[in-house]
Image (cartoon, rainbow, N blue to C red):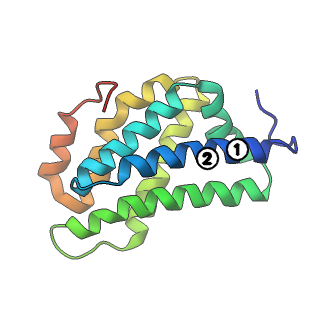
Amino acid sequence: MSDPHDPDFAAAWDRVDRLLQERMIAAFCGEEPWRERMRATLAVAFAFLAEDPERARLYVVDSLFAGEPVHKARHLAIERLGDMIDGGSEEAMALARPPIVALGIAGAIWSHSHGLIRDGRVAELPGDLPQLMFFTVLPYLGTAAAHEELERPFSGSL
C-alpha cells in the first residue's frame, strides 16, 4: 500500500497521471464523432486502472489522503475529463450544456471508480463502461443514444 504522506507519493502520483492522460488524450483525438471518442477514452482509462490494482489504488483512493499538491492535481485530472465530456455540447440535440454538467459527470465517474477500487473490485470497472457511457451521453445526445450504449458492452479491446 502506498503512503500518501511519503514525500515520494506526489511524484509517483504524477507519473501515473501522466501515463493515464497520455493514453486518454490519444484515445480522444481523432475524426470520429464525440460519442465514439468518449467511449474510447473511458475504455482506455478503465483498462489502464484495471490492469494494475495497486497503481489504481494509489491514483484514485490513496490520493484522497495526500497533501494539497496532489489534491489540486487530482482536481485538474477530473477537470480534464470534464473538458472531454463537454465536447458533447458540440453534438448536443439543442443548446450547449453548461460546463458544470460535464464536470458533474466526470466527478461521478471518478467517484464510481473510487468505490470499486477501494473495495478491491477494480477489475469490474471496464464492465461498467456501458452504464457510465449511458450517463455520459444522456444529457448531450438524448435517451435513445444513451440506451444504445447499454447494448454496447466493453469487450476488453477497442
* Label disc, if present, on residue 109 of the rendered structure: none
Query: Does dot 1 land on a helix, a strand or a loop?
Result: helix
Q: In which quarter of the image is the C terminus?
A: top left
- Residue position marked by numbered label 2 in the rendering: 17
Query: How far is mark 2 from mark 1, CA to CA?
Result: 6 Å
Q: In this view, does 77 lie to the left or right of 137?
A: right
Q: Quadrant of the N terminus?
A: top right
Q: How many marks?
A: 2
Q: Indicate whether 19 appears above or below 25.
A: above
Query: Does dot 2 land on a helix, a strand or a loop?
Result: helix
The residue lying at 27 percent from left, 74 percent from top is 96
The residue lying at 30 percent from left, 72 percent from top is 97
* Label disc, if present, on residue 13 of the rendered structure: 1
CB-based contact (under 8 Å), mark 2 and mark 1: yes
Q: What residue type is labelled 2?
A: Asp
Q: Is residue 5 left or right of residue 147?
A: right
Place of residue 82 in the rendered image (x, y in percent of width and height, measured from the top left):
44, 60
Please, which residue is most extreme toward the bottom here? 95
The residue lying at 52 percent from left, 49 percent from top is 21
| Quarter where residue 90 is shown | bottom left
Place of residue 125 in the rendered image (x, y in percent of width and height, measured from the top left):
44, 31
| Quarter where residue 15 is shown | top right
Compare residues 39 and 66 and report the one nearer the observer: 39
Q: Which amino acid does label 1 sit on?
A: Trp
| Quarter where residue 84 is shown | bottom left
* Pointer 1 local density, CA inside 10 Å: few below 14, some 14–19, many at least 20: many
* Pointer 2 local density, CA inside 10 Å: few below 14, some 14–19, many at least 20: some
Q: Indicate whether 136 appears above or below 6.
A: below
Place of residue 26 in the rendered image (x, y in percent of width and height, measured from the top left):
41, 48
The residue lying at 69 percent from left, 48 percent from top is 14
